[in-house]
Image (cartoon, rainbow, N blue to C red):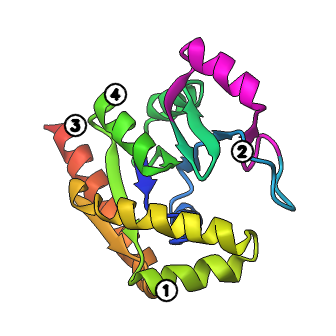
Amino acid sequence: MLVVTGPSGVGKGTLIRSLMERYPGLELSVSATTRKPRPGEVDGRDYHFLTPEEFQRRLVRGEFLEHAEYAGNRYGTLRSELDRLDAMRAAGGDEIRGLVLEIELQGARQVRRALPEAVQIFVEPPSLEALRTRLVGRGAESPEQIERRLAVAEQELAAKDEFHHRIVNDRLEDAVEALARLVATIWGQRKSGENE
Protein backbone atom coordinates (compact mmCIF):
# COMPACT_ATOMS: atom_id res chain seq x y z
CA MET A 1 0.00 0.00 0.00
CA LEU A 2 1.24 3.45 -0.95
CA VAL A 3 0.01 6.39 1.11
CA VAL A 4 0.46 9.70 -0.69
CA THR A 5 -0.18 12.85 1.32
CA GLY A 6 0.61 16.54 1.18
CA PRO A 7 -1.21 19.88 1.07
CA SER A 8 -4.31 20.39 -1.05
CA GLY A 9 -3.35 21.58 -4.53
CA VAL A 10 0.20 20.20 -4.43
CA GLY A 11 -0.51 17.83 -7.32
CA LYS A 12 -0.93 14.50 -5.55
CA GLY A 13 -3.66 13.36 -7.92
CA THR A 14 -1.68 14.26 -11.04
CA LEU A 15 1.41 12.45 -9.75
CA ILE A 16 -0.62 9.37 -8.84
CA ARG A 17 -2.31 9.23 -12.27
CA SER A 18 1.09 9.42 -13.97
CA LEU A 19 2.46 6.71 -11.69
CA MET A 20 -0.50 4.44 -12.42
CA GLU A 21 0.06 4.85 -16.17
CA ARG A 22 3.56 3.45 -15.67
CA TYR A 23 2.46 0.70 -13.30
CA PRO A 24 -0.99 -0.60 -14.32
CA GLY A 25 -0.97 -2.98 -11.32
CA LEU A 26 -1.54 -0.02 -9.02
CA GLU A 27 -5.12 0.94 -8.18
CA LEU A 28 -6.36 4.11 -6.54
CA SER A 29 -8.40 3.74 -3.39
CA VAL A 30 -11.68 5.64 -3.63
CA SER A 31 -12.09 7.85 -0.56
CA ALA A 32 -15.37 8.78 1.06
CA THR A 33 -16.25 12.41 1.67
CA THR A 34 -19.06 14.63 2.90
CA ARG A 35 -18.20 17.43 0.48
CA LYS A 36 -20.37 18.09 -2.55
CA PRO A 37 -19.16 16.74 -5.91
CA ARG A 38 -17.30 19.17 -8.15
CA PRO A 39 -18.38 19.43 -11.79
CA GLY A 40 -17.54 16.18 -13.61
CA GLU A 41 -16.97 14.11 -10.46
CA VAL A 42 -18.78 10.78 -10.30
CA ASP A 43 -19.89 8.96 -7.14
CA GLY A 44 -17.97 5.72 -6.68
CA ARG A 45 -15.24 6.71 -9.15
CA ASP A 46 -13.85 9.99 -7.80
CA TYR A 47 -15.22 9.67 -4.25
CA HIS A 48 -17.92 7.89 -2.34
CA PHE A 49 -20.08 10.97 -1.66
CA LEU A 50 -21.82 10.51 1.70
CA THR A 51 -24.11 12.72 3.71
CA PRO A 52 -22.65 13.83 7.05
CA GLU A 53 -25.14 11.50 8.77
CA GLU A 54 -24.15 8.45 6.69
CA PHE A 55 -20.45 9.21 7.22
CA GLN A 56 -21.01 9.33 10.99
CA ARG A 57 -23.02 6.07 10.98
CA ARG A 58 -20.25 4.27 9.10
CA LEU A 59 -17.63 5.75 11.41
CA VAL A 60 -19.50 4.50 14.50
CA ARG A 61 -19.74 1.03 12.92
CA GLY A 62 -15.93 0.97 12.51
CA GLU A 63 -16.03 0.95 8.71
CA PHE A 64 -13.16 3.43 8.25
CA LEU A 65 -9.44 2.64 8.19
CA GLU A 66 -8.77 6.35 8.60
CA HIS A 67 -10.77 9.54 8.62
CA ALA A 68 -10.13 13.25 8.94
CA GLU A 69 -11.84 16.60 8.78
CA TYR A 70 -10.39 19.01 6.29
CA ALA A 71 -11.62 22.48 5.28
CA GLY A 72 -15.02 21.86 6.84
CA ASN A 73 -15.64 18.45 5.24
CA ARG A 74 -14.98 14.89 6.36
CA TYR A 75 -12.87 12.41 4.38
CA GLY A 76 -11.97 8.79 4.98
CA THR A 77 -10.87 5.44 3.58
CA LEU A 78 -13.41 2.68 3.95
CA ARG A 79 -12.02 -0.65 5.16
CA SER A 80 -13.75 -2.27 2.19
CA GLU A 81 -11.02 -0.71 0.00
CA LEU A 82 -8.53 -3.06 1.69
CA ASP A 83 -10.33 -6.02 0.10
CA ARG A 84 -8.93 -4.77 -3.21
CA LEU A 85 -5.42 -4.83 -1.75
CA ASP A 86 -5.90 -8.40 -0.56
CA ALA A 87 -7.04 -9.42 -4.06
CA MET A 88 -3.95 -7.82 -5.60
CA ARG A 89 -1.67 -9.63 -3.16
CA ALA A 90 -3.37 -12.93 -3.99
CA ALA A 91 -2.86 -12.30 -7.72
CA GLY A 92 0.92 -12.24 -7.16
CA GLY A 93 3.17 -11.83 -10.18
CA ASP A 94 6.34 -9.86 -10.72
CA GLU A 95 4.78 -6.55 -11.71
CA ILE A 96 4.23 -3.80 -9.19
CA ARG A 97 0.81 -4.27 -7.60
CA GLY A 98 -0.77 -2.26 -4.87
CA LEU A 99 -3.36 0.13 -3.62
CA VAL A 100 -2.65 3.86 -3.57
CA LEU A 101 -4.28 6.06 -0.93
CA GLU A 102 -4.39 9.79 -1.63
CA ILE A 103 -5.23 11.14 1.82
CA GLU A 104 -4.80 14.04 4.20
CA LEU A 105 -2.08 14.25 6.86
CA GLN A 106 -4.38 13.21 9.73
CA GLY A 107 -5.40 10.11 7.81
CA ALA A 108 -1.81 9.26 6.89
CA ARG A 109 -0.90 9.28 10.56
CA GLN A 110 -3.79 6.93 11.35
CA VAL A 111 -2.76 4.54 8.57
CA ARG A 112 0.84 4.60 9.87
CA ARG A 113 -0.43 3.39 13.25
CA ALA A 114 -2.81 0.78 11.79
CA LEU A 115 -0.57 -0.46 8.92
CA PRO A 116 3.06 0.41 9.66
CA GLU A 117 4.19 -1.57 6.59
CA ALA A 118 2.43 0.92 4.26
CA VAL A 119 4.85 3.12 2.29
CA GLN A 120 4.17 6.77 3.13
CA ILE A 121 5.15 9.55 0.72
CA PHE A 122 4.82 13.27 1.41
CA VAL A 123 4.43 15.55 -1.63
CA GLU A 124 5.41 19.16 -1.05
CA PRO A 125 5.26 22.31 -3.20
CA PRO A 126 8.41 24.27 -4.04
CA SER A 127 6.92 27.19 -2.04
CA LEU A 128 3.67 28.38 -0.47
CA GLU A 129 3.34 30.99 -3.22
CA ALA A 130 3.52 28.25 -5.87
CA LEU A 131 0.81 26.39 -3.96
CA ARG A 132 -1.37 29.52 -3.87
CA THR A 133 -1.00 29.87 -7.66
CA ARG A 134 -2.08 26.24 -8.17
CA LEU A 135 -5.11 26.57 -5.89
CA VAL A 136 -6.24 29.78 -7.62
CA GLY A 137 -5.65 28.15 -11.03
CA ARG A 138 -8.00 25.27 -10.20
CA GLY A 139 -10.85 27.79 -10.04
CA ALA A 140 -12.82 25.44 -7.81
CA GLU A 141 -12.89 27.46 -4.59
CA SER A 142 -13.60 30.93 -3.27
CA PRO A 143 -10.76 33.18 -2.10
CA GLU A 144 -11.80 32.46 1.53
CA GLN A 145 -11.59 28.68 0.95
CA ILE A 146 -8.17 29.08 -0.66
CA GLU A 147 -6.90 31.06 2.33
CA ARG A 148 -8.19 28.33 4.69
CA ARG A 149 -6.43 25.66 2.61
CA LEU A 150 -3.18 27.66 2.66
CA ALA A 151 -3.35 28.03 6.45
CA VAL A 152 -3.80 24.25 6.76
CA ALA A 153 -0.98 23.72 4.22
CA GLU A 154 1.47 25.62 6.43
CA GLN A 155 0.67 23.27 9.33
CA GLU A 156 0.96 20.21 7.08
CA LEU A 157 4.33 21.29 5.70
CA ALA A 158 5.63 21.48 9.26
CA ALA A 159 5.00 17.71 9.49
CA LYS A 160 6.96 16.71 6.38
CA ASP A 161 9.90 15.44 8.44
CA GLU A 162 7.65 12.66 9.78
CA PHE A 163 7.94 10.98 6.37
CA HIS A 164 10.89 8.93 5.16
CA HIS A 165 9.95 9.59 1.55
CA ARG A 166 9.38 13.11 0.23
CA ILE A 167 8.85 14.42 -3.28
CA VAL A 168 9.00 18.13 -4.19
CA ASN A 169 6.53 18.78 -7.00
CA ASP A 170 8.21 21.70 -8.74
CA ARG A 171 8.44 20.39 -12.31
CA LEU A 172 5.83 17.69 -12.88
CA GLU A 173 8.07 15.52 -15.08
CA ASP A 174 10.84 15.49 -12.46
CA ALA A 175 8.41 14.71 -9.64
CA VAL A 176 6.85 11.83 -11.61
CA GLU A 177 10.32 10.40 -12.32
CA ALA A 178 11.30 10.66 -8.65
CA LEU A 179 8.07 8.97 -7.54
CA ALA A 180 8.40 6.17 -10.12
CA ARG A 181 12.02 5.51 -9.08
CA LEU A 182 11.02 5.43 -5.43
CA VAL A 183 8.21 2.93 -6.02
CA ALA A 184 10.41 0.71 -8.21
CA THR A 185 13.17 0.73 -5.58
CA ILE A 186 10.80 -0.11 -2.72
CA TRP A 187 9.11 -2.84 -4.76
CA GLY A 188 12.51 -4.33 -5.65
CA GLN A 189 13.56 -4.37 -1.99
CA ARG A 190 10.33 -6.02 -0.91
CA LYS A 191 10.44 -8.63 -3.68
CA SER A 192 14.05 -9.54 -2.83
CA GLY A 193 13.07 -9.81 0.84
CA GLU A 194 10.28 -12.22 -0.08
CA ASN A 195 12.70 -14.39 -2.05
CA GLU A 196 15.24 -14.71 0.76
Residue type for callout 4: Ala
Of the numbered discs in the image, which one, if any, rests on residue 114? 4
Mark 1 or mark 4: which comes first in sequence?
A: 4
Residue type for callout 3: Glu
Q: In the image, is residue 62 part of the stretch drawn in magenta?
A: yes
Asked if labels 1 and 2 touch by Cβ distance under 8 angstroms, the answer is no
Q: Nearer the viewer, mark 2 or mark 1?
A: 1
Of the numbered discs in the image, which one, if any, rests on residue 130? 1
Which x, y percent locates residue 155?
37, 61
Q: In the image, is residue 128 part of the stretch drawn in magenta?
A: no
Q: Quadrant of the C terminus?
A: top left
Which x, y percent locates residue 83?
55, 25
Identify the magenta region: 43-67
Asked if labels 4 and 3 touch by Cβ distance under 8 angstroms, the answer is no
Mark 3 or mark 4: which comes first in sequence?
A: 4
Of the numbered discs in the image, which one, if any, rests on residue 194? 3
Q: Residue at x 60, y 53 (%)?
A: 71
Using the image as rendered, state which of residue 187 and residue 155 is in the foreground: 155
Give neighbour class at mark 3: few <14, some 14-19, many 20+ (Cα, 10 Å).
Answer: few
Mark 3 or mark 1: which comes first in sequence?
A: 1
Separation of residues labelled 1 and 4 (CA atoms): 33 Å
Q: Nearer the viewer, mark 1 or mark 4?
A: 1
Q: Residue at x 65, y 22 (%)?
A: 56
Left or right side of 91 for 182: left
Residue type for callout 2: Tyr
Q: Residue at x 51, y 79 (%)?
A: 131
Q: Which residue is mark 2?
A: 47
Residue 163 found in image quarter: bottom left
